[in-house]
């Protein structure tokens, strides 16, 4: 038997399974305003807990103890981490735009798209303690954007793949040009 998750008057935007515990995290939006989002945790048996945090692109640490994501603020995005045990929010850093963070297999780094506009044409990396975020790539290929698609780490953390996404008139499109293999050390990206 299945039951709906969360409020029936809300649209689910993303769902992430916890790698550690038997719950899932989901972000939903109001049917009347897609900007009215919130984060909630659903538990076996149908219970859920709603957080006041309006998190975008949530992702778990490998051990499931922390959720990373983006808080959209007027004029800038904030990368935050939320400890699962007490749901405390810690701001790691701020950038004009942040897209699709992904935590390394070792849990010590987070890679993400960023830039001055919402196409997120740059690739950045930061330690998960929030110190010293640095740009790895100003541009990848010919106008590849990171506002769509997802970063995927190799199991040993030595490489990160991302679909080749391009900004078209109707929005970003991914996959027609293959994938890019990126280095967390900033070595030349390789298209495949």
Image (cartoon, rainbow, N blue to C red):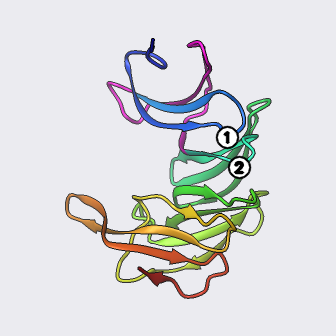
x%, y% of residue 144?
38, 74
**Label 1: few (<14), some (14–19) or many (≥20) C-alpha neighbours in 10 Å:** some
Q: Is residue 60 above or below residue 26?
A: below
**Residue 19 circle label:** 1
The magenta-colored residue range is 30-57
Q: Return the x and y of residue 155 as percentages of the image width and height.
A: 65, 63
Q: Is residue 183 left or right of residue 164?
A: right
The residue lying at 63 percent from left, 27 percent from top is: 23
Residues at marks 2 and 1, CA–CA distance in whole angstroms: 7 Å
The question of residue 138 being in magenta is answered with no
Please report the residue visible at 41 percent of the width from the left and 60 percent of the height from the top: 147
Quarter of the image where one finds residue 111: bottom right
Q: Are marks 2 and 1 in contact (CB under 8 Å)?
A: yes
**182 or 137: which is nearer to us?**
182
Query: Where does residue 132 sit, x and y in percent of width and height?
Result: 75, 69
Residue at image mark 2: 62
Looking at the image, is mark 2 or mark 1 earlier in the sequence?
1
The percent coordinates of residue 51 (x first, y second) are 62, 26
Q: Is residue 13 above or below residue 137?
A: above
Looking at the rendered structure, the secondary structure element under dot 2 is: loop
**Which of the two residues, 11 or 30, is positioned nearer the viewer here?**
11
What residue sits 68% from the left and 61% below the top?
104
Is 191 on the left-hand or right-hand side of 87?
left
Q: Tell me where residue 92 sits by quadrant.
A: bottom right
């Amino acid at each position: 038997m299945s039951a709906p998750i969360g409020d029936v008057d809300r649209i689910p935007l993303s769902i992430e399974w916890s790698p550690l515990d038997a719950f899932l995290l989901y972000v939903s939006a109001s049917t009347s305003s897609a900007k009215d989002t919130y984060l909630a945790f659903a538990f076996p048996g149908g219970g859920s807990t709603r957080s006041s945090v309006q998190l975008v692109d949530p992702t778990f640490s490998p051990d499931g103890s922390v959720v990373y994501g983006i808080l959209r603020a007027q004029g800038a995005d904030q990368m935050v981490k939320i400890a699962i045990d007490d749901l405390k929010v810690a701001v790691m850093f701020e950038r004009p735009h942040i897209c699709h963070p992904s935590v390394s297999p070792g849990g010590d780094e987070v890679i993400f798209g960023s830039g001055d506009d919402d196409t997120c044409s740059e690739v950045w990396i930061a330690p998960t303690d929030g110190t010293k975020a640095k740009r790895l790539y100003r541009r990848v290929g010919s106008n590849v954007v990171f506002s769509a698609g997802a970063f995927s780490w190799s199991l040993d953390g030595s490489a990160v793949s991302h679909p080749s996404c391009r900004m078209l008139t109707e929005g970003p499109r991914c996959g027609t040009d293959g994938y890019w293999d990126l280095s967390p050390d900033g070595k030349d990206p390789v298209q495949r």
